Amino acid sequence: MSQTPEPSSQGADDLFARARGGDQDAWSKLFETCYPKVIRVIRRKLHSTQIRSLYDSTDFASDVLKSLAANAQRLDFPTMDSLMGFLVRVAEHKLADEYRRQTALKRDRGREEASSGDYPSGDPTPSAIAVASERREQLLQHPDEQVREILRLRYLGYGNDEIASQLNLHVRKVQRELRRLEDSGPTSGV
């Protein structure tokens, strides 16, 4: 890339005034002069922050020059040094703002996740309900009538003590049968 001669300090005001007036050649000269310096400042600052891996220095430099163009009617620079000083401050502010934003996002990530509602509820999914229903039907076809009755009462919501008293069984027998069925496969709700 060829070195563009820097506009004289006295010509900076005129160059910026022409650019502000809509002269595209003046904007091009300002861009050619200022962009490489702004990039160097941003790269130096980005190197010392943790956001370097997230952003490209050219993105920040483009934003700085967009800010200059957007606010050109309100700004006035008597020298090229004052213009460069302004652009460097804008670049530093943009980097600092983005660093603060990223740091705040890291701190708030736990709060965002807790309040986002993206956590699965304790409710079964439709497929889990379908699998449980199929398994229940299989179990209710058990060849042992006593086991079928234990399961039927269990599905109705009875506890082990209540099942044992209704069927005149020992509680341990009920627990043993339920554990055996549980070990034989997935039984949602048993």
Image: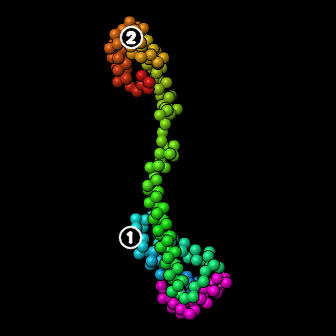
Magenta stretch in the rendered image: 1-26
Q: Nearer the viewer, residue 80 or 122?
A: 80
Query: From the viewer's perspective, is 43 left or right of 33?
Result: left
Crowding at mark 2 (Cα within 10 Å: few <14, some 14-19, many 20+): some
Counting residues from the start of the chain, the first of labels 1 and 2 encountered is: 1
- Tell us which disc is closer to us: 1 or 2: 1
Q: Position of residue 170 (x, y in %)?
A: 34, 10
Q: Position of residue 174 (x, y in %)?
A: 36, 14
Q: Nearer the viewer, residue 26 or 126?
A: 26
Using the image, determine if residue 103 lies above or below residue 19: above
Give the residue at x 47% y 49%: 111
- Residue at mark 1: 48
Q: How many marks?
A: 2
Give the residue at x 63% y 86%: 17
- Residue at mark 2: 164
Instruction: Give the quadrant of residue 179.
Output: top left
Callout 1, which amino acid? Ser
Callout 2, which amino acid? Ala
Q: Nearer the viewer, residue 112 or 4?
A: 112
Using the image, determine if residue 136 lies above or below residue 84: above
Magenta span contains residue 17? yes
Label 1 sits on a secondary structure element that is loop
Magenta span contains residue 87? no
Which label was assigned to residue 89? none
Q: Position of residue 36 (x, y in %)?
A: 48, 81
Regarding residue 129, the answer to whether it shows in the image is yes
Label 2 sits on a secondary structure element that is helix
Regarding residue 151, the answer to whether it shows in the image is no
Q: Position of residue 79 (x, y in %)?
A: 54, 88
